[in-house]
Image (spheres, rainbow, N blue to C red):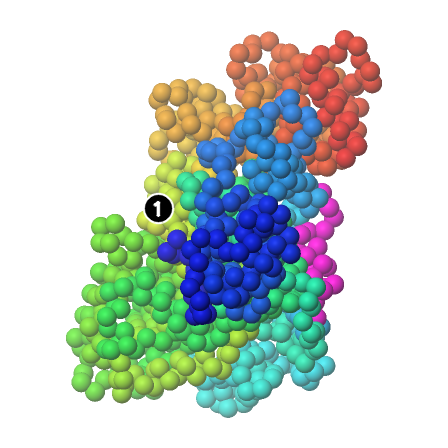
Amino acid sequence: MSDLPITKRDVSVPSAPISTSTPPGWQKFTEKPDPATAKVVAKALQDTTFSAQRMAEMLAQRSAYERSTMSRLIVTQLRGNLALDFLKATAGVRLKTPQKQPEGDRAPGRNESFEALDLATGTVDLVELAKRTDDEEDASSIAYLKKALADITLISSGGEPYSELRRTALRKVAAPAQEHIVKQVGFRTAGSKRTGQSNLTTQHDVESSYWRTSFGEALDDFAEKLQADHKLQEGDILVNSPRVLRKLEMVLDPKVLAKLEIRPLKGDTGISVLRGASDPSLKWKEILEGIGATPSAYQLYELMDAGKKSLPPNFTVDAHADLAQLITSSAFSRLQDTARGKGELAPVCAMVEHLLLGLTDKLGPDRRDALTADALRSLGRLLDIVVEEPNPSTALRAVDLMMDEIAVVLAAAKNYGRVDYWKTMQDVLLKRAPSIAPYVGREIELSSHLMTSGMDALGTALYIALSSRRTDQVSRPTEGIDYFETGMLLGNLKKGEIAKPREDVMVAALNPSTPFESSPAKTLVDGVLKSLKTRKRDDPPFALILDTTVEDGLDPSTGRTRLDEVLNGLKDAIADGSLEVFLCKSFQKYASFGTGKVAAGDLTVLSKQDGYASQRTQAEARLQELDLDLARHDEGQLVIHMLKHGNQDEQALMRSASGNAEFVNRFCWPVTHTDLGSPYVDGIPLLLRSKPEGEIAALFQKLALVDWRGSFSFLRTSFVDLIPGPWGKPTEGQQEDWYTRINTGHESKQAMVEYFYALGHLATGMPPGQKKPTTEATLTLKGVKDHWKALGGVKNEDDADIARYRDSIMASYCAFACQNVRYKPDVLPMLIAFFATTTTGVSIETRRYLAGELIALTNLTGVKSLDPDALRVLCGQAIADFTIPGMEEPDATVALAALRRAAEVLPSWSMKPFAQILKDKLRLKPEPRDDSEEEHRMRNLIDRALKA
């Protein structure tokens, strides 16, 4: 694997010939792996008579369980660089006999006869699983599956979210100086706005829908905790750097600026206190957000632990051995197999693979640190869920939680520094824009600087560009698709100090985050080159500030990325000193792989090598970075690790998500007018949607299966609401709640149908089978019934997509009815019709949601009885309004079978609150002798739920 993120260190030079056969004691070690036999084998590595690479290759020939056990034993016998060399060699070799797993993208169905296995979160193909060996250490076995699903049951049915359980566990082993690392577990810079989510989610005391702009009370809380040590005064404002005062020169009158003072909380760099911001006529919050002055939450946590005690090495733990065991485990091998497959989780699993293997980099994890060892154990537990859980949405939640554990390992080790960041960012840029590689270091100077956010990068770039040009005149060729705060910041710029400012600063976006139009690279390049023609000999270089937050992959027609096209077209102008380019990027978006774990950003500056006019630019960028002092802190550790070992996954994840966006735009929710939404822009996983007259947010907020966020680019599909529109109207004529932005994730196509088909087709008055949207919404139960009837009239041979996703389309309309019909008993017949036949064509997550709704509806006081007569009436209503294939006369057994199918989908702990009332309403006999098969199965499910 040439692309594995392994840093090769200098392996000890052998003092004796290296054996190519087997090391002494190998046979006994394979027959009886234990510390004694491992010690003999490890001695060959210590004596340098056998190479770590060769031993890693030999171990990879064995079964996953043997390899994992033996690798751990060997590492425990090695010290220092030898253990690291063996870890790195192991990370570079895959298991030679990959684990088999079920194929196909659709959710497998449940084998009803396998009663012994209580499937915690859904259903799996037990016929396939029955073929596997019953070995708890083999990730392809039933025993292993049961163990993994038992974990999910324990987490899901417990009272505390996983993040809280982890903070509790980690506090028990953390040193006082590590308490801030524990507090960060579950923190997200753009958390979910959903409440009452699954316990297998990231949850935290500091709730922030978008840290940079909505930290509000959270920041006040930090300030309160810092009061004792740092003596903050009323009115003091925490900002990210002492250099904020310089950036404020852009937006404040000199008289106001003169009243301000700033000082770092500790030392000479990092988070600082801004004092004197008391003028009530100024919108200080907006001003400071606009220049990107929001401090890093991670640095704030660290400041609270400053000066606390560390613990000596704990020799009862061995994190190197733990990591060796993890990356050679059966579960990790299955993760690698999935990463090389074609399913929706493939790019996600590839990202996890690279980040975990990357933990062997540099000096590896802190070997004798109990906090690290605990985090690695949790990674193993979450890895089991990822490879065994049949519900992709649950697997994606587990991946999100894994990022916390990786962050703990990195924060404890603190292996990375500023130089690592510089080198990594240069390597990443030259991979994505190889056309400038021959110029860098010779004709073009390239420097990258870690910022606290994308807005910090943009604000810093503007400050550097404008302060050296004494002008506020900025052109915006991509204004319609710019970072939305750009206009706010530029609108606040103070007036220029010369009579006729030059338009020598341009702000543009590489790709849109509001995707109504793309930004052709050629148009942007031509615009810059045209502007250069008016430049005079002694003028400062023209400045292009380019937002690169949304980076797409290679364009098949050119063989280049869009970034490469832009820089290729401008490289000569940069090299001759007439142009400086500032690349600004938010790492909270796609660079954090859909987790929103970090808020940092990057400012990369390209200018003429050793150019006199650009020396100030490069120097100021470095000073800004030095005053922020981010790289050595916890957030910097995670950012550098993600960039170094997962940079290739950023674009792979975007491609995966953009495929879902294209599908939603084409099939689930097509639009033909910008008032109703945006078109699909190639390679961008974002869509805007509305309905006639706007006000779409409330309908999206009811989409229980879709996450609600304040930002975009997450593993699971989400939305951002309250976006002004319609597109093209002047700002004063726009309505705030016009659009909602869909941010597609990595679920299956069937899940996209279940999320959006019903809402999209009802919002545009377009029943199934109709190809053109209208401007008349039909968002009522009558509209649902009409669409359901229209769906039944579309033959499979007439529409291949409807034929493939018919069950998911029905599920989508059921979900819409559950979420929007006010009188809930009216929905019962529809759910009975849905569950009256097999539902295996529907994703597990949606089946569980609808099953929960059906069982809950039976508990309503309006549903007085579910005896045979009542069930017969329900079946009749289902046939009349929604049809049941093959049914003309109502049958109570069919309605009971629908309830039974719903009950089978739900885990026992989920059904337990409704079980007794359901039993009473069904009036099942305690010990019937002539009961039907359906009644017998239903009673067993209810009894099992009552015992859960």
- Disc 1 residue type (three-letter): Pro
Corner quadrant of residue 624: bottom left
Judge whether 323 appears above or below 388 on screen.
below
Relative horizontal placement of residue 527, taking residue 166 as reference (left or right): left
Q: Quadrant of the C terminus?
A: top right
**Magenta segment includes 165:** yes
Which residue shows up at 36% across the image and 76% down it?
Answer: 447
Q: Is residue 430 visible?
A: yes
Which residue shows up at 62% across the image and 37% down it?
Answer: 135
Relative horizontal placement of residue 557, taking residue 82 as reference (left or right): left
Judge whether 785 appears above or below 227 on screen.
above
Q: Which residues are magenta?
A: 157-175
Relative horizontal placement of residue 143, taking residue 639 as reference (left or right): right
**Magenta segment includes 793:** no
How far across and down, in percent of the image, does residue 196 sit?
66, 47
Q: Secondary structure at mark 1?
A: loop
| Number of residues whose C-alpha sits closer than 10 Å to that of mark 1, classed few (under 14), some (14–19) or many (20 or more) | many
Q: Say which residue label 1 marks.
A: 679
Which residue shows up at 27% across the image and 74% down it?
Answer: 440
